[in-house]
Image: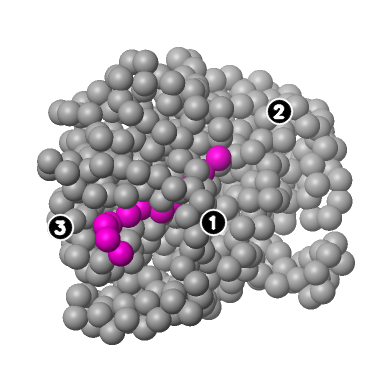
Amino acid sequence: MPAARLRFLGATDTVTGSRYLIETAHARILVDCGLFQGYKVLRERNRAPFPVPPESIDAVVVTHAHLDHTGYLPALVRDGFRGSIHSTEGTEELSRLILPDSGHLQEEQADFAGRHGFSRHSPPEPLYTERDAWAALDQFRAHPFDTDVRVGDVVARFLPAGHILGAAQLRLEVEGARVHFTGDLGRADDPLMRPPRPFEGADVLVCESTYGNRIHPPEDPAHALGEIVTRVCGRGGVVILPAFAIGRAETLLLHLSRLHAAGAIPDVPIFLNSPMAVNGSEIYQDHPEEHRVTGAEFRDMYRLATLVRSVDDSKLLNLRGGPAVIVSASGMLEGGRVLHHIEAYGGDPRNAIVLTGFQAGGTRGAALQHGARELRIHGRDVQVRAEVHVLEMMSAHADADQIMAWLSTAPRPPRATYLTHGEPDAADALRLRIERTLGWPVHVADLGQRVDLTVAGGGATSGTSATAAAPAPAAAHAAARERRHRRAHLDPAATGHG
C-alpha cells in the first residue's frame, strides 16, 4: 500500500453504525465497531459479512460505549478478530454492562420471536450471544485520557468528549498526518457531563453531525419535565420516560431529584426500571473527574427512585397504574423493558410518553416523534393514545451552534473535514455552514469512501475514491496472515493475551 488511508465503513447517511478503517503499510486499525440501528435496510448491514476479514484487523480503538459505536464487537471477535480493543477506562467499565446486556437481549428477542411465531426466520437467531460479548470484553485494554497508545505504527490519544462517561475524541498520528475523530461530542451546558476538550487542530477531521441542522431549544429541560410530570400525575396518569440506560437515565434522575427537592413536582412514586442504569450509576460515582454531580446528589437521586431489578417486579409495574413516573430503557424504543410499559400504558390518554434524546430514523421513537399513533411491538400493533412529548433540549449531543463553536477553537483549518453520524439533511446543512462560515474544505462522507492520508508539507492531502475495488478474498486472507505474524512484533498486547 503506497500511502496510509482512511475508509468509511459506517455512520454515513445515518447516525449509527460507527466504523472507520485506518490502513497503513504496517497495520489495519478499526476505529469504532458499532451497530446499525433504525431502518431495516440499515439493520440488515449488521447481518452482512464485515467489509474486511475480521482476522485481518490488528486492533480496534473505540470512542465510547454506546452500542452504535461498540455493539458489533462481539460479532467481530466471534468471526475471527484477535487483536486488542483499546478504549478509555470509563468506556471499558461501561462496556462490561452494555455488551453482555445487548447479547442477552438479542437472545431473549430471538427466543420470544420463535415462541410467538412472528419472525420470518425459523428459527430466529440472535446477531450474537451474551457469551460472545464476554469473549469480546476479554480483549479490551483500557487507557487514561491524554496518554499516548501505540497501536502498530499509529499513535492514538484519547481526549475528553463529554457526552457520556468515558467518551473520547480520538487523535491519531498516522505516518506524519494527524487524524482527529470527534466521536460523539457532548455539550458545554450539559447538566451531567463536563464539556468536550476544545479542538486542537488536525490534518484530517472526521466530525459528527447528528444535530447539524438543529439548535437545542432554549427552554430549561427540568422546567419542561416538571410541567409534564405535575400535569399527568395530577390526573392519576403514568409518565413513561424512555431513556438510554447509560447517560440519559442519570440525567433524568438528576432533574427529577432537583425538582422534587424544590417542591416543583408532586410526591409520586418514581421507578428506575433498568438494572444497567442502576449499575452504571456506580461507575459514574467512581469517576467524579468526568462529571458535575456531587456524591450527595447521587445519593439523593437513587434515594428518590425505586430501583427495579427483577423481571417480576418489572411486570408488576404494568399492573399498578398511576400516578407514577417510570424511567426505562431503551431511549429509541428499540427494545428493553420500556416496550412492555408502552404496551401497558400507551393506550390510555391520561398517560404520557416523553422522548428525551435523538430518535434515529426507522426507530419506534422516531415514528412517535413524527406523529405515528400505532407501534408494532412484539408482533402486534399497539395503539398509542397517551400524550407524546419530545424534549430535544435533553440531548447529550452538541447542537449545530455548539459544533461550530467547537470547530472554531482550532488553531488552523484542517486540510479536509468529513462529516459523519448524521441523517443526510443534518450532515449537508452542517457542511454548508462550515463552508460559508469557516471557509474550510468539507465533505459529507460516503459509505465505502477511501481517503488518502499522504503527508505533504507537514499536512495531509486528501483524495477520495468511493468506488475503489476491495482486495480480492485470496489477497485479503494472505494479508491477514501477514498481519497476524506482524502483530506479535508491533503490539504484543494485540494478541489478546498481553
Q: Which residue is mark 2?
A: 370
| Amino acid residing under circle 2 | His
Question: Does residue 173 show up?
Answer: yes
Q: Place residue 436 in its image quadrant.
A: top left
Distance between the Cα atoms at labels 1 and 2?
23 Å
Q: Which mark is residue 497?
A: none
User: Element under label 1?
Assistant: loop
* Residue ID at (63%, 65%): 47
Contact between marks 1 and 2 (CB within 8 A): the answer is no
The residue where tag 1 is placed is: 35
Number of the front mark, 1 or 2? 1
Q: Nearer the viewer, residue 318 or 405?
A: 405
Q: Quadrant of residue 480?
A: bottom left
User: Going 43% across and 21% down the picture, which residue do you hit?
Assistant: 432
Q: CA distance from mark 1 to mark 3?
A: 27 Å
**Foreground mark, 2 or 3?**
3
Q: Is residue 374 left or right of residue 229?
A: right
Location of residue 175 by image quarter: bottom left
Q: Which residue lies at the image location 38% right of the left edge and 70% below the top edge?
A: 57
Q: Mark 3 — residue?
A: 148
Q: Are marks 2 and 3 in contact (CB under 8 Å)?
A: no
N-term-proximal mark, 2 vs 3: 3
